[in-house]
Structure formats: C-alpha cells, structure tokens
Image: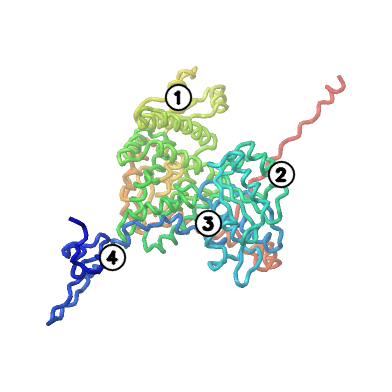
Amino acid sequence: MTDHDPSLDGPPWEEDDVAERDENTDDMFGAPAAAPEPAAAPVAAAPVVAPKTAPSEIEAHADDGSAYQVLARKYRPRTFEDLIGQEAMVRTLTNAFATGRIAHAFMLTGVRGVGKTTTARLLARALNNETDVIDRPSLTLSAHGRHDAAIMAGQHMDVMEMDAASHTGVNDIRDILESVRYAPVEARYKVYVLDEVHMLSTQAFNALLKTLEEPPPHAKFIFATTEIRKVPVTILSRCQRFDLRRVEPEILVEHLGRIADREGMKIEQDALALISRAAEGSVRDGLSLLDQALVQAERGQMVKTETVRDMLGLADRSQTIALFESIMAGRTPEALENFRTLYGFGADPVQVTNDLLEHCHAASVAKMLGPNATRLPNDQAQKLTALGAAIPAATLSRTWQMLLKALDEVRRAPNPADAVEMAIVRLAYAADLPGPEEALKRLQSGDPIGGGSAPRGGGGGGGGASAQLAARPVVQAALPNPQSFEQVVALIGEKREIGLQMDVERFVKPVSFKPGAIVYESVEGAPIELARKLAGRLKEWTGRTWLIAANGQGGGETLIEQQKKARAAERAAVEADPFVVAVLKAFPGATLGEIKRIAPTVVTPEIPDDAGDDED
C-alpha cells in the first residue's frame, strides 16, 4: 500500500470535491464557516441585522475605567499661562526669553505637586519652540509646535529626562557628559532634565561641575528637587534658581472648582475649601483628592461637604472651634463632652489635636493682624479673632506649647482618645493660670494666684498648688453684678464665652433691662437656645437667677449695628477733614483705606548719669 493513488492522473492538490475541513466547524482564527453555494432556485435570505447596543451599555463601557486618566495628568499645564500660583517665576522667565538672557542651567525647587517637573518640560518646549511663525526660544507655546508633543510625552531624542533618584551614580552622569558634546539631532538645544537631583551622590555632583560651569552652547540643564538644602552650593551657584511657591488656598479652590465644572460634576464650595486645606498648597494633592471626592456622588448630584469631611477623616471645624473655646474658658466637663461627641462621629484624635493647634495659631495671628490673616471662612475667622482678643498673648503661647507636647503624647499613646482627654484637662486647668512673673507679683502682694477650673467646670480639681503657696487665707472675690446690658456683654467677654458674646451682639435687640431681667427682640436667624444659654451662664457667674425673655417688640439696634454706625460716622468725619480732602485732591484716584487708631508713643524717661561715681 502506498500513499499515492495510481488511479489519479494529476497531482494531489488538483483533486476536486475534497473537503479540507469539516463544514460544521469554525475557523481556528475565528472566521465563520464558508457559506454553502446557493441552490438552483435560490430563496432571498432575510437580511441579518446587527444587535443594537443600548445607550446605557455604551456609557458603561465608556466609563468602565479602562482608559481613564486621573485629573492630575489630564489637567497638567500645557502652557505657562496654565501654571497657577507661580506668577513671579513666569514673569522672570518671560522677560529673560524676551531679552535673550537665557541661562544655561535652571534649578527648580519647591514642595511636592507645585509643578516642578511640568515647568521643566515647559522650559524644554520653550527652548525648542518652533512653529510656522516662531523660530526662536519663546514662552508663547501652542499645541502645534514641531517638538511639543514628543517633549511633553518624554519621547524626544534631544530632550533627555533622568530620574536622579534611581540613577544616582557617577556612571549615569558620565553618560550625560559623553553625549553632551554632540549637537542636537533635530531640535535647537539639547536639554537635560534631572528630577530629584538632590539624590545624586557626591561623586556624581563633582563629575557634573565642570560641564555645568562651561557647557556647550547647544546644551541646557534643568534640575528639579524638593530638598534644595541637600544640593551642594557649588551646583547652586552655577544655576538660575526658581522657588516654586505653595499655591494659596483661595487660588486652589478656584482652580478645583473650574476642573469640577469641566468634568460636569457639582461640589459644594466648603467641600473644595476642605480639599484645598488638606492639599497644603500642592496642586497635585488637591487634584488627587478632588478625583476621589467626585466619585462620592452620582453624576449630576452635588458632592456634600459632610461627605468630603468623612472622606478626609476630618472633624467639623465649627465643632473643634467650640471645643477650643470650651477649653480656653476652663469648662472641663463641656470640653470633654464635646471631644467625645467628635470621637463618636469618627474624628481622629490626632486630627482633633492638629485642629486645636491650628485654632491656637489662628487666634494668635488674628490678635496681631486681624481676621483676614487666618485665611478661614468669615464666621470662623471672626470667632477665632474674638477669642484671640479675649485671651492674653502669653496664655495663647503657653497653650501652643502644651498642645505641641499633647500632640506627641497622642501619637505615642496606646489609646489616643484617652491622651486627648488628659490634654484637655491640663489645658482647661491652665487656661487662666498666670505667668511666672505675674504669679510672683501676686505672691508678693498677697493676692490670690487663681487658676484651675473648679468654679467654671463644676467638676472640682485645680488650685491645689496655689492653695499650698498661699500663706494667708484668701478672701472670696465678690460676684459680678452687671447694671447695664453693655456690662452684661462685657462680662460675657471676660469669661471668654466668645460664641455667646457674638450671638448676643448680632441677634439681640434690647427692649428693657434691669439687674436680673432682660427683655429683647430676637433677630431672624438667632439660635433657638440663646435665651436659655444666656440665663444659665449669668446665673453661674452672678449667683442669682436671671429672667431672659425673647418675646419683646420694638427693640433698639444690636451692638453690631451700633458699631457699624459708629465706624461709618467716624469714616465720614475723617473724609470731611480738610487735610484729608486736600490729600485726596492732590492725588487723583487715591481712596481712603482702613482707619486705624495709633497707640500713643511711650516715652522712656532718661536715666541721668551719676557724676559722683565718675569722680570717685
């Protein structure tokens, strides 16, 4: 038997009617089986209609995340105009390029996420900017540049990007030194971008010195680092340095809002403020947090502030301000209850302590510079400003030091919540303790030293050391007895009840007053429990029952309205002053700004020289 059939005349591949494969099987590459030849009487086959894909199915595939690009990369600046918060650097570079005074090496430094690598790529594009109308280095970048796409993608042969964190040795620098001698292939300059340059070894820095001092005319170096202090001064002296600043919260909030609008998402302004504060001036961190926040709600729905706060693990700022107020007023039980409420809602003890530190700092800064210096929402800034005005600077400084120590304890404690509670007890006890000098003066004069939170906290404790130091019996101070509504408000301020004081000043129109009874007309928006809270505090401070009625009619102006009217009258008087009128007339376009009262100059008496000692 042989493989060849002798009955066939032609070769095997000319055989007819031999099926190469089973007609009921599919092709191995996915092609359908060949259609059979039509019969003698063909019947028109029904047209095959491809199944339609539902629109929701298409959207699901479009949003399945397979090709999603994070916001930090999607909205990376592509021109110098897109850089936010770096106006000083852009202005300097614009003038340098316009006048042709372009340095051969640039050092970009700043915190994470402020645009160092992006600026380096933009500089590389500007150095090799080439379009139909531009043929010189220029910061006027467009999307149609000859080299732009390759440079921004990191794929241009004349723009070399190197991560110095993973190429730290002298051999990596040697490769750069060998290639820098050759002219660029297609671009104007050969640009070397070294990111995280502070990670280079000492030998690598030394190998770079000579070339960096006298590079070829076709070579430019751009360095980026977050640790400028680790870069040798010999390198810094050969570069033009630019410090990229942290982006201000107001600018970052506006930037995040624009991006959210372009993404078709809605997010509350306070939520953007929380993200901006958590980003700490870093645009990349802010965009990453925004990316995470936008998925907290369905498309078309508003992302709530509470949702973002829970996402960030933050406590409600108004509640932590109330906690700080309770601590500084020495109300220990109330402060402990406030903290336990925050902790029950999931607030991190470390974050609560950090918030208390921020409030202490904001109150101190507002005491010196005013509420605008706190960079907080208006209501929070006003409350902390009033709190700072009522607390001595020495007490705020001592509270800051105690909070710093408490933060370290909270981080190391087995149970952080217990550490925060113990810190609250210490802070409330020491809230009104005098400083060392004041305590010494009181001891010498026989006055009570004070301190402790027993009278205000109602929970005992405090004053032990003072009681032992007092050599003579302490006479109980007389309880206050306010005789007017203004004295009541002043008493509230003395007791550091800043929230209550602001509510009384804004929402109370006094109708009648007599010691022990106040009738007032309530302004719209007043807290529901204002009367009850005011009566309770006055009873605690004065030792007598106060009747507070909020159902009066025909009340006068609130204290805030009176203060505004007084400031307006003062401003009108200043504007009418002949000298001010003459100054404004002499300088057209000048306006009258803020009016401040200058404290009188303290004249130090001169100490006469003792002539008798000289003679002796």
Q: Quadrant of the C terminus?
A: top right
The quarter of the displayed image where residue 4 is located: bottom left
Q: Which mark is residue 210?
A: 2
Q: Which mark is residue 155?
A: 3
The crowd level at tag 3 (other Cα within 10 Å; few <14, some 14-19, many 20+) is few
> Horizontal placement of 89 versus 542: left or right?
right
* Image depth: mark 3 or mark 1 in front: 3
CA separation in Å, label 3 and label 1? 83 Å
Of the image marks 3 and 1, the number of the one nearer the N terminus: 3
Residue 2 is situated, as x and y percent measured from the top left of the image, at 20, 56
Taking the view exactly as shown, the residue that stands out farthest to the bottom is: 41
Amino acid tagged 4: Ile
Of the image marks 4 and 3, the number of the one nearer the N terminus: 4
Of the image marks 2 and 1, the number of the one nearer the N terminus: 2
Amino acid tagged 2: Lys
Asked if the residues shown at circle 4 and circle 2 are in contact, with their CB atoms under 8 angstroms apart, the answer is no
Residue drawn at (41%, 43%), measured in percent from left and top? Answer: 321
Amino acid tagged 3: Gln
Query: Which residue is labeled 1 in the image?
Result: 475
Which type of secondary structure does the marked residue at label 3 adopt?
Answer: loop
Residue 277 is situated, as x and y percent measured from the top left of the image, at 46, 48
Of the image marks 4 and 2, the number of the one nearer the N terminus: 4
CA separation in Å, label 4 and label 3? 33 Å
CA separation in Å, label 4 and label 1? 83 Å
* Image depth: mark 2 or mark 1 in front: 2
The quarter of the displayed image where residue 18 is located: bottom left
Residue 47 is situated, as x and y percent measured from the top left of the image, at 19, 77
* Image depth: mark 4 or mark 2 in front: 2
Rendered image coloring scheme: rainbow
The image shows residue 503, relative to residue 143, as above or below, that is above
